[in-house]
Amino acid sequence: MAETRNPRERKPPRPVTAKSLDNAAVFYLSRFASSSGNLRRVLMRKVARGGGDSAEGAALIEALIARYLASGLLNDQAYAASAAASLARRGASRYVVAGKLAQKGVPADLVKEAIANLADNGSSELTSVCALIRRRRLGPYRDPAKRDDYRQKDLATLARAGFGIDLARRALQVADVEGLEALARGDAED
């Protein structure tokens, strides 16, 4: 009689091959934008779960990533620029952008280049702080009667987000939402 398997037991992992790594990489890249460093980390976790030889798996992954970089399927520079712009639009400071890109395995020189390109494309730190204030409903978005009560809390929120205290004070002292939007566009005078 055949052995029955307990339904709660996990199946043993399939062995990792070049084809399975290629399939996993294509599936991952079809769902997420990624840097080569991040894709390497994702695939190495797959190798570790599969229980195969990590040195052999690393060699397969390096060959796969080199092939993807040569074909243009992976492009660290484009990924860094896109991710940096997206984070800045959401209200991330330059410090946070650099940290997030480093977490995703983007080389330091490309991180610096992406942050420099943000300034060239008109995305300033002031624009980012205004976006975060808008998103979190701080400062001029609060009830005017309660703004003074929340001033320190709003400053702390912006400081934790990586913005300097002078920039945070400047953005929070704006009287109304229209003034904040003008400040973000660069129309407001100090």
Image (tube, rainbow, N blue to C red):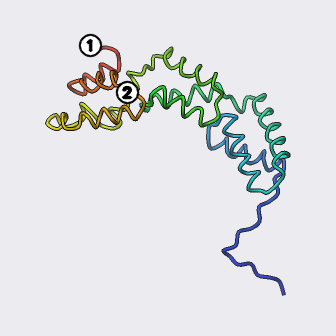
Question: In the figure, is residue 125 to the left or right of 173?
Answer: right
Pinpoint residue 17: horizontal percent, then vertical percent: 84, 50
Q: Is residue 110 above or below residue 13?
A: above
Cα–Cα gap, marks 1 and 2: 16 Å
Residue drawn at x 33%, y 32% as measured from the top left: 133
Q: Which residue is mark 2?
A: 129
Residue drawn at x 48%, y 16% as measured from the top left: 119
Q: Is residue 184 above or below residue 63?
A: above
Question: In the figure, is residue 80 to the left or right of 95?
Answer: right
Residue 171: name its quadrant: top left
Q: Which residue is mark 1?
A: 190
Circle 2: is it few (<14), some (14-19), or many (20+) Cα within 10 Å?
many
Residue type at tag 1? Asp
Question: In the figure, is residue 27 to the left or right of 80?
Answer: right
Residue drawn at x 18%, y 34% as measured from the top left: 148
Label 1 element class: loop
Residue type at tag 2? Val
Label 2 element class: helix
**Sequence order check: which comes first, mark 1 or mark 2?**
2
Pinpoint residue 172: horizontal percent, then vertical percent: 27, 27
Q: Is residue 178 above or below residue 102?
A: above
In the picture as drawn, the residue positioned furthest to the top comes out as 189
Residue 117: name its quadrant: top right
